Amino acid sequence: MRMRPVRMARWSARHPWRAIVGWFVFVLLCLGAGIAAGNNPATTKDFWVGEAGRAESMATDGGLQRRPTEHVLIRARSGPLDTERATAAARDLTARMDALPEVDRVASPVRSKDGTALRVTVVMKGAELDARKNVVPLIDRTAEVAAAHPDLVVEETGSPAISKGVNDQRGEDLALSERLSLPVTLVILLVVFGSVVMAGVPLLLALSSIAATMGLAMLASHLMPDPGVGTNMILLMGLAVGVDYTLFYLKREREERSRAAGRLSPEALVELAAATAGRAVVVSGLAVIVCTATLYLATDVIFSSLATGTVLVVAVAVLSSLTVLPALLVKLGHRAERRAAKKAARRVKRGEPVRTKAAKPENGRIFGALMRPAQRRPAITLCVSVLVMLAVAAPALGLKLIDPGKDTFSRSIPAMRVYDRLTAAFPELLVKHEVVARSTPGRAPRVRQALAELGRNAQADPLFARTAEPVVRTSADGRTSVLELAVPHPAPSDEAIASLDHLRHRYIPATVGQLTAVDTAVSGDVARGQDYVHHERSKLPLVIGFLLLLTFVTTAVAFRSVVVGLLGVVLNLLSAAAALGALVLVFQGTWAQGMTAREAVLDGIARSAKVVTSAALVMVTIFAAFVFLHLTEMKQMGFCLAVAVLLDAVVIRMMILPAALLLLGERAWRPLRPSRRRAAGAPSAPADRPLPHVG
């Protein structure tokens, strides 16, 4: 593995056009295959978790599954509601909705308790997750009714319309993140390289890697269904790692070119870069892939999709940096040589001396200043830096997990604003619990009676809404019955969660739970969210345990040091905890040779400081762009990743890591096997000891 990146780079450097054409053919094949196969979206069944999932499975088997439902709110434009006109608008709406093939039935109008609004409920055909695509005709009919009755406000909301609004907003947000991150990334690369062409190479490879991954992800969705979040992760991580891996390679090649001062060919320079940067990219990519794969242990469709997107895009980005990038560097190197030769010839013709540019220092004043505390006072720097990170991490102790839902969606979505007005007028629509009971057909009457008694008991509880006599629906085969109970509190509220607890542990055991051979379970908005969070919490220790184990093994093998492996685990934990702490605080609360160990640490970190910091700046820029989006989960993901990269690059990379390695000295590299040079009596020269890079 150690020489494979060099061999790949050597082949690409000697056959640049084959490598370049081959890469873009690969991208087109991946994209074409994905488009041909199509995307396989996740279905409702893929989201079933815990007791709520069991309840929905039973209800679906009996044909009593939750149907996609829309609500049309009719209210006065000003003043009191004219009942006659509102009723006429409701009749017009009913007639138009009944004519649509997407509609199953339209319920009779319901007047709000205060008399200010009229509600028409429309039940749609098809699966719950398909409704966001099928709801457009309903929205159009509502708009027609609104135009026909200008004196009234006729507006529509419901889970299908909200899902469509969230999906549309996600698409707009992704376009916005591209408009924000691409120009800023290009400016950073221009500052780093001082060349439009060189700055364009990382972006070209990142974007082509993303395109190839999109196609591969479509193919992968036929093995693991896509819940719709994989694309976000591919774009987010693809641009970040695609640019960063290319940046490391480019900077290394430019350093070798500066040292060679024209004495080496572009092909030789690429091989030299591959010997260090190429291996670093492979090790980093493998570490990300292996660690990300632990998300599959969560056995959750969303985390599996995020893991698949990350694994694929990182693998493709590593492949591009080992194949097409060396070829592009050789072509650009020959181009630079021709331009330099022409400039030198013109100078000679004019009688001017030919000057060679002095190599720029690899470390600037800023990076030197950042590293000076660790160099002069490593123990103090280590203690202070760790304390700072722990202070930032402290708020993570109060981290609260919730399942994103209507209460976390942006109110810039029109359907969400209507939803708020609807639930203000009809608070019983905020939350619904669904009690599902399954038994033999002969016990159906007794089950219905027990469910009705359960409903009456629950409605006497102030946590539940008092509506008409509880209605129990029973399947055609008599095996399954469902009772719906309304709660006038939003899903994440303490009251709604308490109502679920009362239902599961008090009312069911006292009624239908007394019956033998009856299987009961509760689903609904609150149950879905609570069971999902409990499921993830139960899987979290397993995921974190394997993540830390794989981090240790990967780091220890890569650097051939148990101590560095342990240090990597500790620093990764510290970085992740600090990022989570900052997240809670913001969102919830409001290579060295022939050197001593000391020389290796100081020189290695100083030599790589600029490229590491530049790479981190690119990643922070890309991740931070997501903070400006509307969806809360995308804001939190971007913020958390940006903070983690920033803390890793500045505090851990420039302070904690060098301070810890300086204090450990040669002990950090135990049990490093002695090199052949040392065995032959030569002085110690750990030539292939790479610089530890945590993160």
Image (spheres, rainbow, N blue to C red):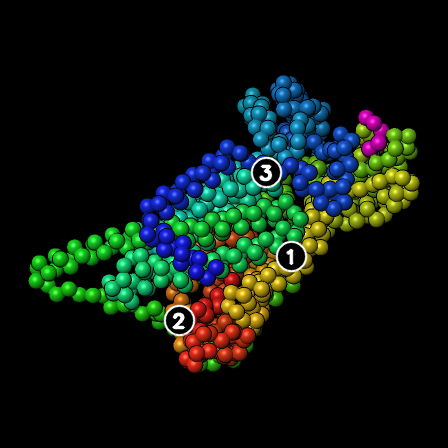
Q: Closest to the observer: 38 or 263? A: 263
Q: Is residue 301 visible?
A: yes
Residue highlighted by disc 1: 543
Residue 586: x %, y % from top left: 56, 58
- Upstream in sequence: badge 2 or badge 1: 1
Residue highlighted by disc 3: 222
Q: Nearer the viewer, mark 3 or mark 1?
A: 3
Q: Crowding near pointer 3: few (<14 within 10 Å), some, many (20+)?
A: some
Q: Quick check: is 647 in the magenta stretch?
A: no
Q: Secondary structure at mark 3?
A: loop
- Upstream in sequence: badge 3 or badge 1: 3
Residue highlighted by disc 2: 606
Q: Closest to the observer: 67 or 359? A: 359
Give the residue drawn at x 51%, y 68%. 559
Give the residue drawn at x 12%, y 60%. 347
Give the vertical position of 618 relative to 670 (above or below).
above
Segment colored magenta: 476-481
Question: Given the image, on which type of amino acid does mark 1 rest?
Answer: Val
Question: Given the image, on which type of amino acid does mark 2 rest?
Answer: Ala
Question: What secondary structure is the stretch in magenta mostly built from?
Answer: loop
Question: Given the image, on which type of amino acid does mark 3 rest?
Answer: His
Q: Nearer the viewer, mark 2 or mark 3?
A: 3
Q: Is residue 684 visible?
A: no
Residue 152: x %, y % from top left: 59, 27
Give the vertical position of 391 relative to 537 (above or below).
below
Residue 430: x %, y % from top left: 70, 40
Q: Quick check: is 479 in the magenta stretch?
A: yes
User: Label 2 to label 3, Cα distance in Å?
Assistant: 47 Å
